[in-house]
């Protein structure tokens, strides 16, 4: 198994991954555009040329002069590979990259009811902000 940041050379692996993890497919152009942006991070666990888990993060620039921060948008592991420490490895890899780039923060949003995610984030050093935080979504977009 290999844990690393995906690059343009991995575009076809990502297309296959989307079909494995989702009930739809993606377009090669979309994958390549996402990978070309240096502030998009896809860290994956690859086993026998197949992506079996990944974390997708976006580096966010700050207006206040402080160092950038990382928003973790998604963490996915194929069902048959869950519970084997892969999530922890890919999260730690992304956090290590953030430390090496002197980012100011790493943050992720999840639900308390998602106990697997809560355990993963706590096991990699994450701390809940507070019990008062609320996330709002705008469906009208």
Image: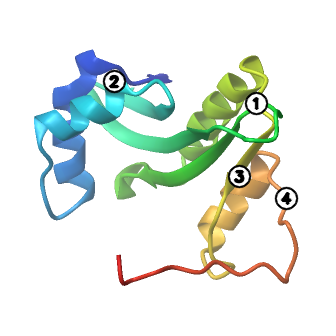
Do residues under tags 4 and 1 come within 8 Å of each other at their CB atoms? Answer: no
Q: Mark 2 or mark 1, which has the lower sequence index?
A: 2
**How many angstroms separate mark 4 from mark 1 (CA)?**
17 Å
Q: Mark 4 or mark 3, which has the lower sequence index?
A: 3
Residue 46: x percent and y percent?
A: 37, 28
Q: Mark 2 or mark 4, which has the lower sequence index?
A: 2
**How many angstroms separate mark 2 from mark 3 (CA)?**
23 Å
Q: Which residue occupies the foreground of this view, 69 or 7?
A: 69
Q: Measured along the vertical axis of the image, is residue 136 above or below residue 3?
A: below
- Residue behind mark 3: 107
**How many angstroms separate mark 3 from mark 1 (CA)?**
11 Å
**How many angstroms separate mark 2 from mark 1 (CA)?**
20 Å
Do residues under tags 2 and 3 come within 8 Å of each other at their CB atoms? Answer: no
The structure residue drawn at horizontal position 58% and vertical position 49%, both measured from the top left corner, is 72
SS label for mark 3 = strand
Q: Which residue occupies the foreground of this view, 68 or 17?
A: 68
SS label for mark 1 = loop
**How many angstroms separate mark 2 from mark 4 (CA)?**
31 Å
Q: Which residue occupies the foreground of this view, 125 or 141?
A: 141
Please state, as top left, top right, bottom left or bottom right, where the C terminus lies in the image: bottom left
- Residue behind mark 4: 127
- Residue behind mark 2: 36
Q: Residues within 10 Å of mark 1 (few under 14, many from 20)?
A: some
SS label for mark 2 = helix
User: In front of the other: label 4 or label 3?
Assistant: 3
Q: Mark 4 or mark 1, which has the lower sequence index?
A: 1
Residue 47: x percent and y percent?
A: 34, 28
Q: Coloured how? A: rainbow
The structure residue drawn at horizontal position 66% and vertical position 23%, both measured from the top left corner, is 97
Q: Residues within 10 Å of mark 2 (few under 14, many from 20)?
A: few
- Residue behind mark 1: 103
């Amino acid at each position: 198994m290999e844990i690393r940041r995906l690059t343009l050379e991995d575009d076809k692996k990502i297309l296959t991954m989307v079909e494995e993890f989702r009930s739809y497919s993606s377009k090669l152009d979309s994958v390549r555009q996402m990978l070309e942006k240096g502030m998009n991070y896809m860290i994956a666990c690859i086993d026998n040329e197949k992506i079996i888990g990944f974390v997708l993060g976006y580096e966010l620039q700050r207006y206040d002069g402080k160092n950038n921060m990382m928003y973790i948008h998604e963490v996915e592991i194929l069902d048959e590979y869950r519970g084997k420490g892969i999530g922890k490895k890919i999260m730690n890899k992304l956090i290590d990259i953030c430390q090496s780039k002197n980012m100011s923060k790493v943050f992720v949003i999840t639900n308390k009811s998602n106990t697997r995610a809560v355990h993963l984030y706590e096991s990699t050093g994450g701390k809940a902000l507070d019990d008062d935080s609320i996330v709002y979504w705008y469906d009208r977009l």
